Image: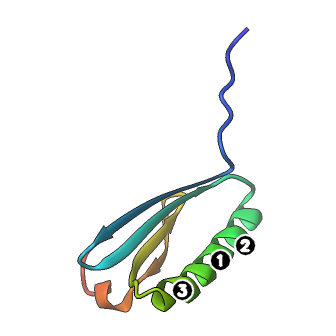
Amino acid sequence: MRAHSARSPARAHLEQDAHGLSVWLGLDGDASAVRLQAAAVLLELQRVLPANGQRMARVVCNGVAIYRAPHLEKETP
């Protein structure tokens, strides 16, 4: 019998640098569910971070960039 480790259906890694907060999300589910969850998280981050004096730099979900701050648009990934 193999040991089965439980993995959370939603994982996040946050990193702060001079450009702002970068967020990497790992979300389980089918493509439609992941898109809905990622959109909800993005909207919440866009609401909460500025209210707390934070600037968002980028959000990546399951390896796909879903947000890149306008001040980073001219930079390479």
Determine whether, in the image, residue 26 is placed left or right of residue 24.
right
Question: Label 1: how many residues lie within 10 Å, few (<14), some (14-19) or many (20+)?
Answer: some
Q: Is residue 61 above or below residue 66?
A: above
| Residue to which mark 3 is pinned | 46
Q: CA distance from mark 3 to mark 2?
A: 15 Å
Q: Position of residue 11 (x, y in %)?
A: 58, 53
Instruction: Tell me, yes or no, whether the two marked residues, 2 and 1, touch with CB atoms within 8 Å.
Output: yes
- Colour theme: rainbow
Q: Quadrant of residue 17?
A: bottom left
Q: Position of residue 69 (x, y in %)?
A: 39, 85
Residue type indicated by callout 3: Gln
Q: Position of residue 39 (x, y in %)?
A: 65, 77
Tell me which residue sits at (33%, 78%) in the image: 20
Q: Which mark is residue 39?
A: 1
Residue type indicated by callout 2: Leu
Q: Is residue 2 above or below residue 54?
A: above
Upstream in sequence: badge 1 or badge 3: 1
Determine whether, in the image, residue 47 is placed left or right of residue 60.
right
Judged by depth in the image, the label closer to the viewer, 3 or 2, is: 3
Q: Is residue 58 above or below residue 60?
A: below
Q: Which mark is residue 36?
A: 2
